[in-house]
Amino acid sequence: MRFLYTVLLWLLLPFIFVRLALRARRQPEYWQHLGERFGLYSGNLDNLVSRHSGVSRNPVIWLHAVSVGETRATVSLVAKLRAAYPEHQILLTHTTPTGRATSEQLYGNGVLRVYLPYDYPFAVRRFIRHFRPEIGILMETEIWFNLIHGGHAAGVPMLLLNARLSEKSGRGYARFASLTRSALQSLTFIAAQTRDDAARLILLGAQSEKISVTGNLKFDIEPPHAMLELGNALRRQFGATRNVLLAASTREGEEALLLDAFQTQGGGTLLVIVPRHPQRFDEIAELLAKRGLRYQRRSGNSEVEADIQVVLGDSMGEMFAYYAAADIAYVGGSLLPFGGQNLIEACSVGTPVLIGPHTYNFADATRLAVAAGAAVRVKDADELFQLANALLADATALAEMGQCGTQFVAAHRGATDKAMGVIRAVLGKR
């Protein structure tokens, strides 16, 4: 089955380049470092020497974080890895340019970073031979059949950490039952976020004795002090006495729904829209202009005039600051069936959260947040603005909801220490 899977990948190769070209039209960074996507790495290893030189080098701990959310989830883990293994070099791999850019913002030159190669056997072999990692840590839902097989065959312990698997993703992997089972059984260990995630992985073939529930690393993220300070500055720009509703990490089609409701129910509230993908910033600016809404871009870094209705959050790496500057936040990807985005960051700074009906990507965290009183689910954009207006008119209820958010996050910390226990156990056997 893995042979047939690889043949299919080769047949799809021309379409991969077409897809890259289409994405590069909106985000030119997709054409950068193209060789890395096929296992070609050169000129980016400042403190690693050629494997043929005979000179010793720092051992490598490799973490794969697909995009922005997974990369941000590595913060507490990377800090503890650096403290526990100071002689090791941390290598971060990514799939998207935004994930790579987030890594640069978070870690600068303190880690190595490259794109993970596509799942071709030759590219996987090149990657492993070049970096020779002591351990490979795949974050969340990264089950790549040739990658896991290649690591296993090369004697690299492979972990699936902070693992989550929605019912939808589970059904998708079940279509390739034998491939998925083989990959899961080739993993050294799986640390799942929840019991439901663990159960779905076991149903797909993971061995129960090689899986445990360790919680969600995203609860361990501490709001950076610099971001909180920036949040205070943004709040002054927005207007200290003005109600601010943040629409965070919005996805395609959601902005139109939100603006429909805002234009009938917004009143004097300032709506701050931060699209999930930076390549959509100009698209949303055009949408605002077509609707005749008065707006400013965050990148202008200027005071928001009293007649401005919308601020377009066209900046990267400032989500904590946006949350800290808002009175209430809608966490995007949930009004339409995108599966939702991470609401933990908003709760961690005490910002009340509204979410839509589609949250299957963060089902457990959302359920717990709603139960804790930190978030409220709405059925559509109209109900979202009705509830937002009611909360903004009730300072006591708004403050209580924010306090519930910080308490909710504090109650679920500890996943990083559990994950470190798994890593130590694996590395200790080498």
Image: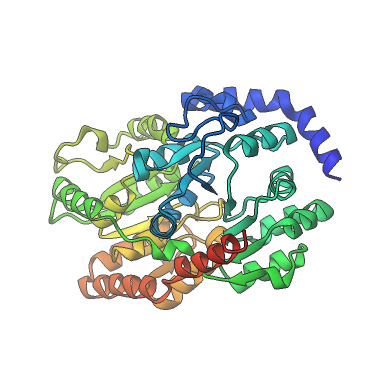
What residue appears at the point 25 percent right and 34 percent down from the top-left corner? 299
What residue appears at the point 40 percent right and 68 percent down from the top-left corner? 375
Of 40 and 94, nearer the camera is 40
What residue appears at the point 30 percent right and 47 percent down from the top-left corner? 272
Q: Can residue 358 be spotted in the picture?
A: no
What residue appears at the point 69 percent right and 57 percent down from the top-left corner? 187
Res. 384 image quadrant: bottom left
Q: Is residue 241 above or below residue 284?
A: below
Residue 404 picture location, percent across and down: 33, 75
Res. 304 image quadrant: top left
Q: Is residue 98 above or below residue 141?
A: above
Query: Seen in the image, is 230 located left or right of residue 364?
Result: left
Query: Seen in the image, is 146 located left or right of residue 79?
Result: right
Q: Is residue 25 above or below residue 412?
A: above
Report the colour scheme.
rainbow
Residue 121 picture location, percent across and down: 74, 36
Residue 153 picture location, percent across and down: 75, 47
